[in-house]
Amino acid sequence: MSYELVAGLETHIELSTKTKIFCQCTTEFGGEPNTHCCPICMGMPGTLPKLNKKVVEYAVKAGLATNCKIRNISKMDRKNYTYPDLPKAYQISQFDKPICYEGFIKLSSGKNIRINRIHIEEDAGKLIHERGDTYIDYNRGGVPLIEIVTEPDFRSIDEVHEYLEKLRLIMKYIGVSDVKMQEGSLRCDVNISARKKGEEEFGTRTEIKNMNSLNFIAKAMEYEFGRHVDILESGGKIEQETRRYDSALNITESMRGKEDADDYRYFRDPDLVNIIVSEEEIKKLKDELPQLPDEKLDIFINEYGLPKDDAELLIKYKKIAEYFEEASKDIKNKKLISNYILSQIFRRMPTDSDKEECSISLPPEYLKELISLLENKKINSSMASNALEKMLDTGKPVSEFISQKDMQGIDEDTLREICMRAVTENKDAVDSYLGGKEKAFGSIIGYIMKETKGKADPQKAGEIVREIIKSF
Amino acid sequence: MHGYRAAIKRSSYKIEVGERMLTKEEVLRIAKIAKLSVKDDEVEQLIKDMSTIIDYADAINSVVEDSELEFDDINNIANAFNEDIVLESYDRDEILKNREGGEKGYFVVRKSLRG
């Protein structure tokens, strides 16, 4: 019997505001333990939280970029639970009136993953368990988060993977989060169940908590789905429960069952006033949104004529995409620019974070200048590559490495003359070529390139040589 | 749905006290979640007491149900915001002043698993 996976995601994304959600302590990552704290984020009695305006703006932007509706009036609620990561014994979150609701993200297959809601909340402190003790660092406590909750629309791990990549890219493009998974600024809870193919009703689900790597999420889901299928196949029943993924053992294990289900006793936080976002403010924030990755992809493929894979590589890094756009302005053959970026220039940025930062010192205008010389046949491609290497080394423009004279290229009469000489002075090669040895042709072109110090366009030279040989 | 609203909505919106009694199972489950041990001879009284409380909540709920008052707050103000400008945090010694034990700038508690 074959089974189908059904999954939904809750994704926490740390917002890249400078300050915490309810006080003005810094949100900077790292720092000595408990040095980014004040009486408000420590939950001292008598303190009053006040919402960071940027948090509201960022949450609304995140909602707009994921096709959500925005609630004009929302409020903050208290979610009560007792655990050392939370000094107040409650987390300030949003319960029944999340700021964004009913959105979606479209996958490449055309399928929409529906977003149920996006709400604002505060992060908890960081716990380090050691030798039976728990060490607490509250620097992260009060860092603003948005939680993005999908409907149970995923039917495969690939869909989850694509959704998360897209979500990450969108958040990066709109600048509300740096979404560094290794720093925990994107964390996921996965709700997963299995049902027989063709069945309508969902199976009993389990929830895997708090994973911060795409790789772990995939592995955990694979394990958990297999576990469900095994239990169902052997006639057992799935317990509704919360589980955690142990990456060392590659298994999921039970954290708590349904009977111990959290009862968070949500109620409105009386310390915080209503959040009102007017239609004008929503429009203003919408106008501030940059072009989103999907729109860019569409333009790169359909207007610029880039192959899909190349376009995807370019938009994967916002700064690279922008570099490409700058460099290819007024250039007709945009694929030429893209090719140089994806090969020679990418070699200078070996790691993901290099590409993320677009860590080269060459301004895009210089690349444009070089490519327009190539496009107008002033220089040939090997000259362009050589010059580009030197330009990347120094960050200097092409004029530093190719003289004005060399940029002139070679006029056709001169080239024809040299080609004629190449044919008469390389009789043997011409004979071998006529005798069917394609390779010999290369040595004729080689002679021309040598004579012209690499300035000739080898393709053009080849055409002329063929013409001359034919006329013999 | 979690929390008080769920608890309130579970019973119908009637004002008469004692309209719907909690079951023994419900009381025992709530006790379990609250980590309270309940003796057998206490259950009957708890059913009565807790049903009264739920009914009282129902009465309140019937007044505020789904109206504009959902967003009512005492001060009737909105949008009190901080600007996103970093101010100096507290000195760590001040923050850690009330801790018991602890080392290297951390608060330390005995390990506890959530759940």
Image (cartoon, rainbow, N blue to C red):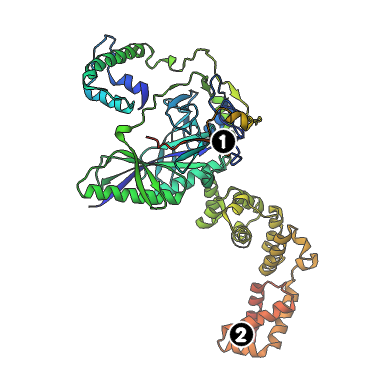
Q: Residues within 10 Å of mark 2 (few under 14, many from 20)?
A: some
Q: Mark 2 or mark 1: which comes first in sequence?
A: 1
User: Depth check: A238 or A373 in front?
Assistant: A238
* Residue A428 figure quarter: bottom right
Farthest residue toward the left? A235
Q: Disc 2 or disc 1, which is closer to the eye?
A: 1
Query: Left or right: A162 with respect to A347?
Result: left
Spot occupied by residue B86 in the image (x, y as percentages of width and height): 65, 31
Query: Which chain is mark 1 on?
Result: A
Which residue position is annotated with label 2?
A440
Residue A197 versus residue A115 in the image, above or below = below
Amino acid type at circle 2 is Ala
The disc label shown at residue A139, or none? 1
Estimate the spatial distance between the alpha carbons at disc 2 and disc 1, rounded to whole Å.
71 Å
Q: Is residue A24 visible?
A: no
Query: Which chain is mark 2 on?
Result: A
Farthest residue toward the front? B101
